[in-house]
């Protein structure tokens, strides 16, 4: 009974780009070669632009450093973070492909419980090509997977599902913890392989991690802005969280789906919790204000494109979160700049994304 | 950082009852002996009361047949279904324990991927004694499990969680499919062991199956009414679904949590899909009306007990679903009768359940 059948777990090179933010040589790509080499890489070099980043032979890539970003965006480059992996969103903007996969350079190929290498990219593609089920919870998880379906009591009118805009993958080994949790549990490692993909229900926010993330750029790209972090900003490590809150509110409004679960990558090294605490310090307070704000945010019905939704959200950010700290006024302005830059690089705004039929 | 630590995965005999609806000898208990024998069983015999149900030696139990139900409840026995496993809710009413576990008599002990027998009851107890996280999604699933925690970006103010009212377990082998899906996929078996427990977010409904279900009777008992099904009624096989919709709306209102996932039981035999289709026929249409009704149902703030919430919900059912079919008018009346009978057997209404602190 699972609605659309989903044979394709493969995309052509002209359908997907892999975006990697980095400050170092990309030796980690060696391990990913069998899975990534068929695709084009967009490398966003962070920090000192005079440094040379080595990319292993045989990969097809373009590389942008800070000078490139400044040259391409001019004054609008101010919306792209510096000295923070938030700079990766520049790669989303310059891509011309339908799908994006972004991964951190300390993430390696994980193994499934049988010991087999996990092709994370393939699982993301499957997730994105299968519908989501945001309106009602299916207790056997993704009903479109082999061997699964909608359970008794799942309304038939909702089984067509919604278009999937985002696929959020997880991490074995070092989990994505905040600095306080890292400090308290320095040795905790994630060894639990949960064999599930699920839709995050409509109306529910989640902490979106940018370490292992894929999305449909045509459906949700302009909302994937990773904010103002790092150099000159009062916070870091909230870039992907910010994007996740905005993206989820807009997906819910437009009837699009967000999935989480498989695939796992192997996250090799915990970042320094003391450095992280400094970066996160203000964010830990601010998220207590931001999350209720996003939980209660509603968008007017006439916002039918991602761009419209995002501009509307920026106004609400300025009005409501601007009271929490001056930073959010600056961020709201940067959200507008981001959309202007996106539209400048991508031509006329994308057609309205209307979600499920 | 996981808030309350949860050492206890054990309950005393005076804290939990196991409720089993049946029409046959309970040979299936042999397999459960190591796990169930320490507890008291409440057996609700369905169908012909003159038939004798054999219970294996050594179990401590009480058994109620239709004559007992009629004698104990008098005219209010009309709210308890006949010739449908919905009759099990009578067992919830006569129990005096804090926790209930209910299981079908065609459910056996499942094995985990290492081949070890799964103590389903123990996992349910763990689920019920651990808090839930209904207000925000944790991507590493239950943050209170060993080796897991709240991920980066999870607001600290929400890490205390909410009291857990319901633990919904799953099924290996024969999945809980509706008749149309059974007809289309007669051979589909669930072999995927998903090693996860998760909270169903606030505001999201789910299809609650009564086959392998535990709950906190003090927190949510009066809402666990399995409706009017079977003999003399136009539908069957929607008893647990009905309870699940009501329970979830009330848990959301009272700030209580609902979990799903582990534990698995082994469901041995699919029921006859042709018989099921006849029972489900009207429900398949009606659920298309019921689910939007429950998705939009709101309860007034002054409803602070489960009983108040349930009576209020019965009024809304009569008013709104009564237009769909006369059956819902009868069901709404039975909901009131159920609460009257519950209070009669259990003394004054339970104190207000206020959920998390």
Image: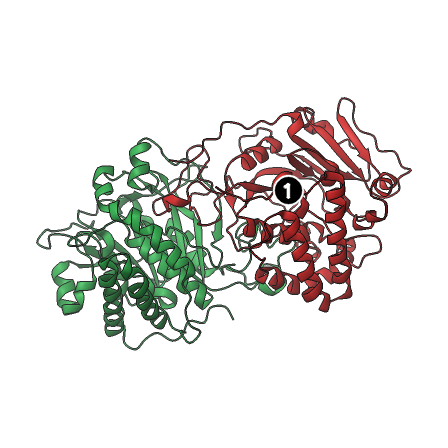
Chain colours: A green, B red
Q: Splitting the image into 4 quarters, where does residue B121 fall?
A: top right
Q: Is residue B75 left or right of residue B314?
A: right
Q: Position of residue B1 (x, y in %)?
A: 37, 35
Residue appearing at x 73%, y 58% in the figure: B332
Q: Is residue B120 left or right of residue B226?
A: left
Q: Position of residue B9 (x, y in %)?
A: 55, 28
Q: Position of residue A264 (x, y in %)?
A: 39, 45
Indicate the secondary structure of the residue bearing disc 1. strand
Residue appearing at x 44%, y 68% in the figure: A254
Total numbered badges shown on the rendered structure: 1
Residue toward you, A114 or A142? A142
Q: Residue at the far left: name it.
A: A50
Q: Residues within 10 Å of mark 1 (few under 14, many from 20)?
A: some
Residue B181 visible at all: no
Answer above or below: position of B40 versus A117.
Answer: above
Residue tagged 1: B173
Answer above or below: position of B326 versus A105.
Answer: below
Q: Is residue A74 left or right of residue A89?
A: left
């Amino acid at each position: 009974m699972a609605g659309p059948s989903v044979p394709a777990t493969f995309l052509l090179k002209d359908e997907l780009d892999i975006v990697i933010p980095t400050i170092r040589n990309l030796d980690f790509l060696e391990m990913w070669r069998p899975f990534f080499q068929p695709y084009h890489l967009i490398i966003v070099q962070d920090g000192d632009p005079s440094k040379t980043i080595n990319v292993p032979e045989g990969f097809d890539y373009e590389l942008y450093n800070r000078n490139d970003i400044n040259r391409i965006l001019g004054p609008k480059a101010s919306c792209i973070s510096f000295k923070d992996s938030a700079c990766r969103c520049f790669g989303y903007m310059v891509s011309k492909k339908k799908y994006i996969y972004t991964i951190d350079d300390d993430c390696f190929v994980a193994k499934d419980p049988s010991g087999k290498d996990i092709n994370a990219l393939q699982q993301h593609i499957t997730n994105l090509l299968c519908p989501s089920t945001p309106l009602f919870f299916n207790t056997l998880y993704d009903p479109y997977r082999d061997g699964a379906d909608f359970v008794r009591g799942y309304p038939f009118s909702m089984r067509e599902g919604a278009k999937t805009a985002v696929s959020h993958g997880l991490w074995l080994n070092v989990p994505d913890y905040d600095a306080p949790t890292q400090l308290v549990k320095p040795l905790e490692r994630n060894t639990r392989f949960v064999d599930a993909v699920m839709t995050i229900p409509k109306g529910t926010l989640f902490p979106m991690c940018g370490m292992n993330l894929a999305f449909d750029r045509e459906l949700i790209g302009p909302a994937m802005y990773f904010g103002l972090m790092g150099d000159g900003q009062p916070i870091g490590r909230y870039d992907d969280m910010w994007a996740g809150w905005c993206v989820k509110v807009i997906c819910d409004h437009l009837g699009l789906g967000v999935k989480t679960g498989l695939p796992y990558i192997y996250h090799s090294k915990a970042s320094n919790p003391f450095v992280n605490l400094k970066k996160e310090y203000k964010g830990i307070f601010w998220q207590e204000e931001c999350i209720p704000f996003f939980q209660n945010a509603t968008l007017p019905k006439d916002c039918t494109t991602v761009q419209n939704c995002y501009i509307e959200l920026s106004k609400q950010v300025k009005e409501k979160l601007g009271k929490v700290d001056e930073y959010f006024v600056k961020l709201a302005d940067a959200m507008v700049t981001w959309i202007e830059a996106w539209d400048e690089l991508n031509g006329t705004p994308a057609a309205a994304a209307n979600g499920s039929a």
